[in-house]
């Protein structure tokens, strides 16, 4: 299939990746746009992996206050250079993530930050639920793991579905930005505030 300039431009608008990267991805995907997007996302992950030893000390602190001023969040997102931190695209990502935190109230950035005691408590609760529902003994372990994964998807920021595009996770957004910029991009920390509520993070 012939890859036209229009196809390449369209994919570039959708993903923000470079023209040559978009062309290569489309050629590899034989013109299938959805497949090409997956290829670009995977390449972004590869770039992030290769750069994992580098230090991301630049970035932005972004805030989002929900209409009415009752709920808001602040987030620190890091990259390697001030040049990337100052781009509109990077700041837009930070704003989207602050909005995500405001709306979805995650507990932590990544699952490793959840205390082992809390994970064990959740497992115990899911085990008791499965057993009280009369689930077969050989299926209980899988049910507990599935429910634990669902719990992580609710409380871990990187694993949450992005509220604007639920088919993508916050980790996907970070990986894609890393692929586009060629830099490590990471969420360092966040704090959510809700009027009259203590410790809403």
Image (spheres, rainbow, N blue to C red):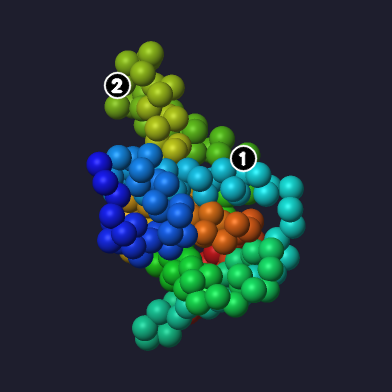
The numbered dot on residue 98 is none
Q: Quadrant of residue 7?
A: bottom left
Mark 1 = which residue? 117
Quadrant (top left/top right/bottom left/bottom right) for the C terminus:
bottom right
Question: How many neighbours does mark 1 have within 10 angstroms: few (below 14), some (14-19), or many (20 or more)?
Answer: few
Question: Is residue 201 visible in the rendered structure shown here?
Answer: yes
User: Vertical placement of 201 versus 88: above or below?
Assistant: above
Residue 122 is left or right of residue 190, and the answer is left
* Image location (x, y in percent) of residue 174: 52, 57
For the residue pair 138 and 14, the one nearer the viewer reads as: 14
Identified at 60% across, 77% down, the residue is 86
User: Vertical placement of 61 versus 24: above or below?
Assistant: below
- Check the image and name the residue furthest to the bottom: 68
Q: Quadrant of residue 56?
A: bottom right
Identified at 56% across, 56% down, the residue is 178
Identified at 74% across, 48% down, the residue is 53
Indicate which disc, 1 or 2, sits on the residue closer to the N terminus.
1
* Image location (x, y in percent) of residue 37: 37, 49
Mark 2 = which residue? 134
């Amino acid at each position: 299939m012939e890859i036209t300039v229009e196809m390449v431009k369209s994919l570039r608008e959708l993903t923000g990746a470079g023209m040559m990267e978009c062309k290569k991805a489309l050629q590899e995907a034989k013109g299938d746009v959805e497949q090409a997007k997956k290829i670009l996302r995977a390449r972004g992950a590869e770039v992030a992996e290769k750069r994992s030893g580098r230090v991301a000390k630049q970035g932005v602190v972004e805030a989002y206050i929900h209409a009415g001023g009752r709920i808001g969040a602040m987030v620190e997102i890091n990259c390697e250079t001030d040049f990337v931190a100052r781009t509109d695209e990077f700041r837009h990502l930070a704003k989207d993530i602050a909005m995500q935190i405001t709306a979805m109230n995650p507990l932590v950035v990544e699952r490793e930050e959840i205390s082992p005691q809390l994970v064990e408590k959740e497992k115990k609760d899911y085990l008791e639920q499965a057993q009280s529902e009369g689930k077969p003994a050989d299926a209980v372990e899988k049910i507990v793991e599935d429910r634990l994964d669902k719990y992580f998807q609710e409380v871990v920021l990187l694993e949450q579905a992005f509220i604007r595009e639920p088919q993508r996770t916050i980790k996907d957004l970070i990986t894609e930005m890393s692929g586009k910029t060629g830099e490590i991009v990471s969420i360092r920390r966040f704090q959510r505030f809700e009027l009259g509520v203590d410790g809403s993070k």
